[in-house]
Image: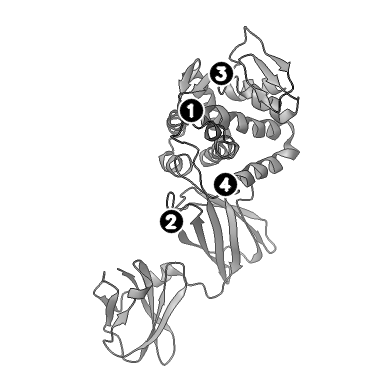
Amino acid sequence: DFIELFYDLYGPYPFEDQKYGHCMAPIGGGMEHQTMTTQGSFSKGLTAHELAHQWWGNSVTCASWSDIFINEGFASYSEYVMLENLYPAEKVQHMLDVHDNVLSQTGGSVWFSDTLNENRIFNSRLSYDKGSGIIHSIRYLMNNDSLFFAGLREFQNDFKDSVARGIDFRNKMQEISGINYTPFFEQWYFGEGYPTYSIRWKQSGQDLLLELNHTASKPSVTPTFTNPIDIRFIRQGMSDTLIRFDVAANSQQFYISNFGTLSSTITVDPQNWIINNIGTIIQDNSLVNLNEMNENSTALTIVPNPNNGIFTIANQQANCWVSVFNMQGKNILNKQLSQNELIDLQDFGKGTYLLEIKNSVNSEAKTLKLISF
């Protein structure tokens, strides 16, 4: 069953004239000798992993130790593929275990430069599990299993009896799908860490305002992860819905009209496509719609803008209140202004901020402005 499965997914068994066998030995794992694997047991995960090496490692071999991903990332992912197709009840826990191992430390990249460090070459967390996890994510980004596995077969055919680098695999995926995988590889293959996602949301009638934030576990190397992410919503009296959100920044807002009434259940990445942690998911009725604020920002003028953190509001009425929000929607300053009074934000650091001006009589929002300094 395993050989037939990998034949269908990866292409013909590379050594058909030489067959395939096993040599049992008292070892803790296995060793993928070409056509004759040495194994200490016949557990299905180990057996699938070592068999997959006939395609990934023996037919197509890593061009250098830095590219061990070609061997071990794919052999490890083949364990998941085997479960997915032959033992589907076990696939979810397997991928959770893969992710948990990667998440056990904050840093580390799949690619590495120290090719003399054997422990790093065969690091189970990075070369095996993170390698496996990002192949799963590449499949998710392609969102077309027929195309994804066709790409794997083409890659096997192009590099059979030869060597390949991680970027060769990236280039093949780009070629077959038309998707630019360079940012993904910069963040996930060459970069370090993983995102932790948090959500704030507010319901207004049948409309939903959702703020998706993420922090990086190794921001000095990879501060932002721009892969899309799935979020599942449970709605009252309606079917569940799964929405894929495109991520371009550490903090973004999404407004969905006529969404229905949301229950308190929101699940990020329910199918475990992306290596990630989950932070907080909260309903926050104080959440401010930043897009609406920007659209209404024509009445007043910030002078100067951009600025060094000190500015004033031109054309404002006396005795107005100003509220300042950072881009995470946090209210960092409330102040009553006299006409032409200076505002000082230097203590809050360089960045982009949002201003809300309120009339002191009715406290209605009149206008808002972005400030960059």
The reply to whether callout 4 and callout 1 are in contact (CB within 8 Å) is no
Q: What residue type is labelled 3?
A: Asn
Disc 2 versus disc 3: nearer the observer: 3
The residue labelled by disc 1 is: 65
The residue labelled by disc 3 is: 58
Q: Which badge, 1 or 2, comes first in the chain's sequence? A: 1
Residue 150 position, x and y percent, is: 54, 26
Q: Residue 249 carries which label?
A: 2
- Residue sticking out furthest to the left: 304
> Are there few (<14), some (14-19), or many (20+) residues within 10 Å of tag 2?
few
Q: Which amino acid does label 2 sit on?
A: Ala
* Residue shown at the point (46%, 30%) measured from the top left: 115
Residue 57 position, x and y percent, is: 55, 22
> Are there few (<14), some (14-19), or many (20+) residues within 10 Å of tag 3?
many
From the image, which quarter does the N terminus lie in?
Answer: top right
From the image, which quarter does the C terminus lie in?
Answer: bottom left
Q: What residue type is labelled 4?
A: Ile
